[in-house]
Image: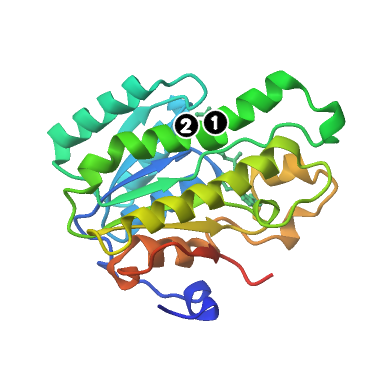
Amino acid sequence: MLTAEQIIAYQASSELLKDRIILITGAGDGIGKAAALACAEFGANVILAGRTVAKLEAVYDQIIAANGPEPVIYPVDLEGATPEDYDELAVNLDKQFGRLDGLLLNAGILGQRTPLSNYRQDVWDKVIQVNITAQFQMTQALMPILEKSKDASIIFTSSGVGRVGRAFWGAYAVSKFAIEGMMQTWASELDGLGAIRINAINPGGTRTTMRAQAFPAENPNELKTAEDIMPTYLYLLGPDSTGVNGQSINAQNR
Ligand code: NDP
């Protein structure tokens, strides 16, 4: 495995992800959008999953305009989708591609920034549903087609507040701790068994809508962009990280 510094500075070769089938949630905006464009640039067939079709269509158009492999748009709302919907997704992907080589579980929501003692039950339920339950259900349903890949990589999305609890981060922090725990548990179960590895990325403060929502007074120009943090995503999705399993990796060094 590369060192933390080497991963952040990773330089992908031009055909790193050629012919890989990679599904990205939240592919219409922020980090997920940057990941979709980067994966296509390095040769992957990307499945653009998300809830706002117009945003997914814009990413689709950008990939085609850059002569990337034709992506697939798959509308899914992690708040309302059921295990049956994810089973249907698996069947559709199996029919179209016969396997899945990468699964980037990126979509997430912030919820309220408020003390836990004031936290609203309905917001709690929504954050836990989107940020952890849906991630579990989708991953479980897609496991059989990930098993058909000769080198499959699953990436969960963590956060600094998923490692050290901090005031006012509420259900978001709790869900990200749960992500770290689910990643470790699943990675331990998969260890040494087959060709699937599972890791988490902590993007670090990144210039997106969610970050602006969490830190409205911050100057966004002082933050890394989603494009800046792509080396870590590319490293974990490509063959250079084969064998790396159960790690929680920072995409920035600050
Ligand atoms: P954005 O809010 O910019 O993007 C989030 C994406 O998730 C959007 O595409 C959004 O879709 C999608 N999404 C939200 N809810 C749902 C849902 N119910 N069903 C399907 N898709 C949904 O956030 P970021 O890009 O900043 O965050 C991406 C990930 O990185 C998140 O997991 C976040 O927790 C994590 N993260 C981000 C950091 C940062 O500084 N930006 C720091 C640490 C972690 P739509 O556009 O349609 O709303």
Residue 218 position in % (x across, y down): 82, 52
Cα–Cα gap, marks 1 and 2:
5 Å
**The N terminus sits in image quarter:** bottom left
Residue in view at x 53 percent, y 65 percent: 249
Quadrant observed for ligand 1 in the rendered image: top right
Query: Tag 1: residue type?
Result: Val
- Up the image or down, 92 lies above or below 28; here it is above
Ligand 1 closer than 8 Å to label 2 CB:
yes
| Residue 49 relative to residue 225: left or right | left
Ligand 1 closer than 8 Å to label 1 CB:
yes
Numbered tag placed on residue 43 in the rendering: none
**The C terminus sits in image quarter:** bottom right
Determine contact: label 1, label 2, CB under 8 Å: yes
Q: Which residue is mark 1?
A: 130
| Residue 204 relative to residue 88: left or right | right
- Up the image or down, 248 lies above or below 175; here it is below
Query: Tag 2: residue type?
Result: Ala
